[in-house]
Image (cartoon, grey):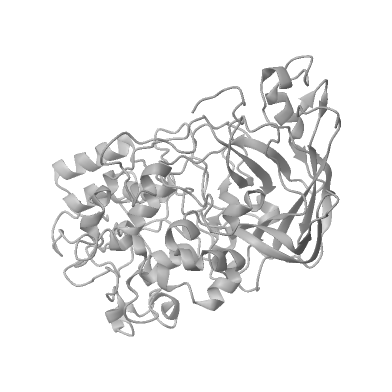
């Protein structure tokens, strides 16, 4: 039998208590994340989600949100999808082929049904009534076929008189959403329209030089009572599988079932304003102005001077370019988790400290060498760090300490190859075989959400369900007797969570901040500095501090639905709330 280690009763109990109480926190996720796109909100990606549908597990739900911080009472000209914008969802399912394999393209169209009034809705008519065309490409964007024409977009949720009364539409907003869920001719379910912003974050604290949790005063969800516009699509797994993949996965970590997902918005190159007040005209080639894959990348990893550049790249350009890699090898946030740098300047991050002497050998602080000393040695032969395997990607050179954890999480996904297995069964050697817990490796592009579609969804009502995603799965795999007795592949709850895709409930802020502080390294056996190599108990105070870190805002301001599109209804303009 294989055990993590002999854990003292006190620390095992503490860690178990942390699992029971839940470890939560927040951070902003690519809302107004670059200077130029901040001035073009209709084309601004705010968040991207991709998860196996909990109530329909033969499908994958992908949600791409746009238009940050919509005031529900933002009349008389309410928010809506933009015309002359291509909103696209991209899927990569085959690392052997360059670029996307599948593209969904949405374009929107608006009409005024009653131009004689300043009201948006009156007597059963809508102004800025919006419909959409959905096209799908199965050859990487070379050719497109229309799979929905005149798709319905619900109006903004203005208030009860506009929506429910006879002087308005005489219906309910639930009915409007239900009527707007449409089946594509190729089997997808689609919803396009307003929704509550599903993200939750103390914007004020986070951007006040990392004051989360706030050192003085109470945290506040800066996105509470705001809406966004969402494109939600539920796609059969069979549609997303790469050519030649088996209809049934060989295991819950079948590499054939890995997809990469990213979203974008594009505009034409030239806009001409008309002197007579007519609508502007657009012409020229289409130019990508916004993109999104992993949360927080452009917002909290890429510095201001490169944010617009990042938005123009595709993930495939990014992987080939290498210009931005340094921001992942030596992330700015890690400077505030290192007392030899600027750790003392950000007291809110005091629980988060990067390993500087893991196993008394390896230093992962910025500017140091991480695992580089192992490059080319017999110790890494046959592992992912071997140049003959993935070593040229993961150990590119000295002074790049996070090339083995943060860089692959954002750029390739994580393979089920040593050392990327849980410390369970490793007996203190991080380069030994351990318990598999993630395989979403797709080394074909840069920043994407990568999802292994073979991993079963965790029931949202399961007592083990946690917004901590893969971190919770790792902790269970390390300490729970149901999972830590051997190194066999098991379906551990929350293996379907971020960064294996992203569920609406996932607390990506805490997960990513913990990852910057080295928690993924600890999970595979590169423990924190206060653990002595060979010791009986790696559940040290530093590890517990990292796992218990939270920023103060714990959940969304509205409950998610249990069926597609899962998003909460948009807030009414008459709700107030703020």
Q: Is residue 557 or residue 282 the one in the foreground?
A: 282
226 with respect to 335 (left or right): right
Residue at the extreme top: 166
The residue drawn where x is 27% and y is 68% is 365
Image coordinates for residue 55, horizontal then vertical, percent: 59, 36
- In the rendered image, the vertical position of residue 117 relative to residue 474, given as above or below: above
What is the count of numbered marks?
0
> Hey, which quadrant is residue 232 in on the image?
top right
Residue at the far bottom: name it: 376
From the viewer's side, name the closer residue of 200 and 517.
200
Would you say residue 565 is visible in this rendering?
no
At 69% across and 25% down in the image, what residue appears? Answer: 173
- Of residue 576 and residue 249, the one placed in the foreground of this image is 576
Residue at 30% x, 84% y is 377
Q: Position of residue 294 (x, y in %)?
A: 51, 57
Q: Position of residue 135 (x, y in %)?
A: 79, 54
What percent of the width, then of the height, locates residue 430?
28, 67
At a point 84% along the width and 35% down the height, the residue shown is 112
Residue 82 visible in the picture: yes
Along the viewing direction, whichever of 2 and 372 lies nearer the viewer: 372
- Work out whether 1 lies above or below 565: below
Q: Place residue 271 in its image quadrant.
A: bottom right
Q: Quadrant of the N terminus?
A: bottom left
């Amino acid at each position: 039998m294989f055990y993590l280690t002999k854990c003292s009763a006190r620390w095992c109990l503490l860690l178990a208590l942390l699992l029971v109480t839940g470890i939560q926190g927040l951070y902003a996720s690519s809302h107004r994340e670059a200077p130029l796109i901040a001035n073009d909100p209709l084309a601004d990606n705010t968040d991207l989600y991709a998860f196996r549908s909990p109530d329909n597990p033969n499908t994958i739900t992908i949600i791409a949100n746009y238009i940050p911080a919509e005031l529900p009472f933002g009349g008389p000209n309410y928010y809506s999808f933009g015309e002359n914008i291509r909103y696209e969802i991209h899927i990569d399912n085959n690392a052997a082929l360059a670029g996307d394999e599948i593209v969904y393209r949405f374009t929107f169209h608006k009409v005024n049904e009653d131009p004689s009034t300043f009201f948006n809705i009156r007597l059963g008519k809508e102004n800025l009534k919006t419909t959409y065309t959905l096209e799908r490409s199965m050859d990487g964007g070379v050719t497109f076929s229309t799979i929905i024409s005149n798709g319905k977009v619900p109006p903004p949720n203005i208030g009860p008189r506009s929506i429910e009364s006879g002087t308005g539409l005489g219906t309910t907003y639930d009915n409007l959403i239900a009527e707007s869920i449409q089946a594509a001719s190729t089997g997808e379910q689609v919803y396009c329209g307003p929704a509550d912003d599903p993200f939750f974050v103390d914007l004020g604290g986070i951007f006040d030089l990392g004051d989360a949790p706030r050192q003085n005063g109470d945290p506040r969800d800066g996105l509470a009572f705001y809406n966004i516009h969402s494109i939600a699509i539920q796609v059969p797994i069979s549609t997303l599988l790469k050519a030649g993949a088996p209809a049934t996965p060989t295991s819950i970590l079948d590499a054939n079932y890995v997809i990469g997902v990213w979203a974008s918005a594009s505009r034409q190159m030239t806009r001409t304003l008309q002197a007579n007040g007519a609508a502007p005209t657009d012409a020229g080639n289409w130019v990508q102005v916004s993109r999104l894959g992993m949360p927080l990348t452009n917002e909290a990893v890429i510095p201001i001077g490169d944010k617009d550049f990042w938005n123009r790249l595709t993930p495939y350009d990014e992987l080939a370019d290498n210009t931005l890699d340094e921001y992942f090898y030596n992330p700015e946030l890690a400077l505030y988790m290192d007392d030899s740098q600027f750790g003392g300047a950000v007291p809110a991050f005091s629980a988060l400290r990067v390993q500087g002497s893991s196993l008394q050998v390896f230093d992962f602080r910025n500017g140091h060498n991480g695992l580089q000393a192992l490059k080319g040695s017999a110790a890494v032969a046959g592992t992912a760090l071997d140049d003959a395997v993935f070593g040229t990607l993961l150990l590119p050179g000295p002074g790049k300490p996070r090339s083995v954890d943060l860089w692959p999480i954002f750029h390739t996904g994580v393979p089920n190859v040593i050392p990327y297995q849980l410390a369970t069964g490793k007996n203190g050697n991080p380069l030994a075989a351990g318990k598999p817990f993630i395989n979403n490796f797709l080394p074909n592009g840069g920043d994407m959400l990568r999802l292994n579609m073979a991993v079963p969804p965790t029931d949202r009502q399961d007592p083990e369900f946690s917004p901590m995603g893969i971190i919770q799965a790792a902790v269970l795999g390390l300490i729970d007797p149901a999972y830590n007795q051997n190194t066999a592949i098991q379906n551990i709850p929350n293996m379907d969570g971020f960064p294996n895709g992203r569920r609406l409930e996932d607390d990506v802020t805490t997960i990513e901040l913990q990852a910057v502080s080295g928690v993924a390294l600890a999970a595979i056996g590169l423990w924190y500095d206060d653990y002595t190599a060979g010791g009986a108990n790696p559940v040290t105070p530093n590890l517990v501090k990292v796992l218990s870190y939270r920023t103060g805002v714990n959940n969304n301001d509205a409950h998610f639905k249990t069926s597609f599109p899962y998003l909460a209804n948009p807030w009414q303009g008459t709700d107030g709330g703020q």
